[in-house]
Image (tube, rainbow, N blue to C red):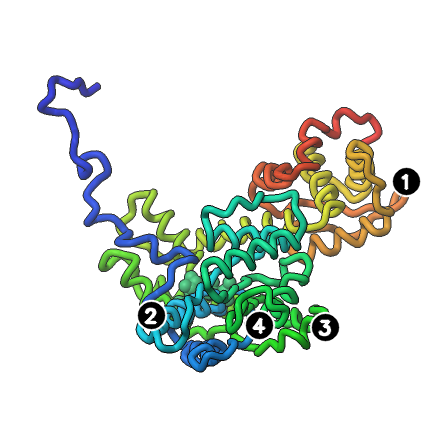
């Protein structure tokens, strides 16, 4: 064993401790983050102009249009709207004659702030960090009044970007926003404009017609990217993200092809690139090879399965937990009869009425379609029919942990099939 002999050997510099950064993979990993706004966007000129038009009326002292932006995941909706907002704010700063008061824009991710009060709380606290408004426990009207107070006190107009707006429960705030000027709840010539973004192309038809007609949304549709566009997007970003010579054209092609097959999803391309680069980096490899992208793809597919699992309603998640627990209990796998019976037990533990056997049977079909399980042909025997069912995840442990991350299901952590003689 190497002995430390004296202070001459003591390592102190960053290079000695962490290695020489010039040989590492990353130059700037931050540019691969989903929140990063690149200095230029590729292949979205027409959408940039369309979104700019929504805001243009502000330059003539008019109220801007409300907008609804649609398009599949990874078609560049979020990054494009943020890009346009930043440019528009720069323009207003350059041309103070356009408007006699300040315009602020607030971005809210509705997947994280899924109730209307949470959205209002987020907007209020972003605008006024001194606001005393409580996080919860007061009515929607009280939040709205506070918002109007902040707008009036600060003498501002507001552009609210509601990303993943389909995740928002309720739509009264949209109505409140659009009526605010008319009802003189904010100063004259001021506005609260809403731009909603959704991955769900049918979202517009799901809105209350009363709201649709009063909001008069302008729709902006983002089409999926083609392979060549994803290639250009990646090539631009790779130059900023990695040190020279770290990634080959072949590796970029692999990411772009995979993403193009996945409905032209640029987000998938970036996830692959990030994971592949991280794998190479933690293994001390000098290059991100195609093999790392393949490995990253498998990891991401597993993560996606887990996200699908925890996105199901409660009864589906109890069924999945039943499959997980039975699989852990018996390495040979399990079957639909045992799953249904243990599901009933788990429901009893939670004080819930179980769904009917035939409803549960139909859930197996859904799980199979999403790739969470594989199920064999129906078998018949004593006590009716059953199917052998196998989980399709690499880490049952990760799936189980994800399912327990829920206020209700966590109580089932110690309930095991071996406690019940009939299972
Ligand atoms: N035209 C583009 N130019 C540069 N980067 C882009 C472009 N479109 C998308 N991206 C990048 O791809 C990823 C996904 O884009 P995002 O805006 O999040 O898609 P969406 O909101 O439609 O799901 C982000 O990392 C974003 O920076
Ligand atoms: Mg988005």
Q: Residue placed at 76% from the left, 42% from the top?
A: 335
Marks 3 and 4 close (CB-CB < 8 Å) = no
Q: How far apart are the two marked residues, 2 and 4, measured between alpha carbons?
A: 26 Å
The residue shown at (67%, 30%) is 413
Comparing 297 with 50, the one in front is 50
Query: Local crowd at mark 1 within 10 Å, few (<14), some, or many (≥20)?
Result: few
| Residue 256 seen from this side | no
Dot 3 alpha-carbon crowd within 10 angstroms: few under 14, some 14 to 19, many 20 or more: few
CB of mark 4 within 8 Å of CB of mark 1? no
Residue pushed farthest right? Answer: 383
Tag in front: 1 or 3: 3
Position of residue 272 relative to residue 55, above or below, is: above
**Residue at figure coordinates x 73%, y 45% from the top left:** 314
Q: Which callout, 3 or 4, points to the residue nearer the camera? A: 3
Give the distance between the C-alpha atoms of the residues marked 4 and 1, in whole angstroms.
57 Å
- Name the residue that disc number 2 marks: 93
């Amino acid at each position: 064993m190497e002995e430390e002999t004296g202070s001459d050997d003591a390592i102190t510099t960053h290079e000695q401790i962490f290695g020489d950064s010039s040989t590492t993979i990353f130059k700037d990993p931050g540019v691969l983050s989903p929140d990063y706004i690149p200095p230029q966007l590729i292949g979205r000129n027409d959408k940039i102009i369309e979104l700019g038009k929504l805001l243009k009326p502000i330059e003539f002292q008019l109220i801007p249009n409300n907008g609804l932006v649609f398009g599949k995941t990874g078609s560049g909706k979020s990054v494009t709207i943020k890009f346009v907002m930043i440019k528009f704010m720069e323009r207003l700063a350059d041309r103070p004659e356009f408007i006699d008061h300040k315009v602020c824009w607030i971005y809210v991710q509705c997947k994280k702030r899924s109730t209307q009060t949470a959205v209002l709380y987020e907007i209020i606290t972003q605008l006024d960090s001194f606001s005393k408004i409580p996080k919860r426990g007061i009515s929607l009207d009280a939040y709205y009044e506070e918002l109007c107070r902040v707008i009036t006190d600060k003498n501002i107009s507001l552009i609210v970007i509601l990303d993943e707006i389909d995740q928002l429960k309720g739509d009264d705030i949209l109505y409140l926003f659009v009526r605010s000027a008319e009802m003189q709840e904010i100063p004259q010539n001021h506005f609260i404009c809403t731009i909603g973004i959704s991955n769900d192309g049918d979202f517009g038809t799901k809105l209350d017609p009363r709201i649709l007609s009063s909001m008069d949304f302008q729709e902006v549709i983002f089409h999926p990217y083609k392979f060549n566009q994803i290639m250009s997007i990646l090539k631009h970003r790779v130059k900023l993200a990695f040190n020279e010579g770290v990634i080959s054209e072949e590796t970029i092609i692999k990411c772009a092809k995979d993403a193009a097959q996945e409905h032209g999803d640029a987000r998938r391309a970036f996830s692959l690139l990030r994971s592949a680069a991280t794998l190479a980096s933690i293994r001390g490899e000098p290059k991100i090879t195609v093999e790392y992208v393949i490995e990253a793809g498998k990891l991401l597919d597993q993560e996606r399965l887990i996200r699908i699992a925890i996105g199901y309603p409660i009864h589906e998640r109890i069924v999945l937990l039943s499959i997980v627990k039975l699989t852990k209990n018996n390495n040979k796998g399990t079957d639909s009869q045992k799953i249904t019976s243990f599901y009933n037990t788990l429901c009893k533990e939670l004080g819930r009425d179980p769904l009917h056997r035939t409803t549960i049977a139909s859930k197996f079909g859904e799980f199979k379609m999403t790739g969470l399980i594989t199920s064999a042909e129906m078998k018949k025997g004593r006590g009716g029919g059953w199917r052998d069912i196998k989980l399709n995840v690499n880490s049952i442990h990760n799936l189980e942990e994800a399912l327990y991350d829920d206020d209700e299901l966590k109580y089932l952590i110690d309930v095991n099939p071996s406690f019940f003689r009939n299972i």
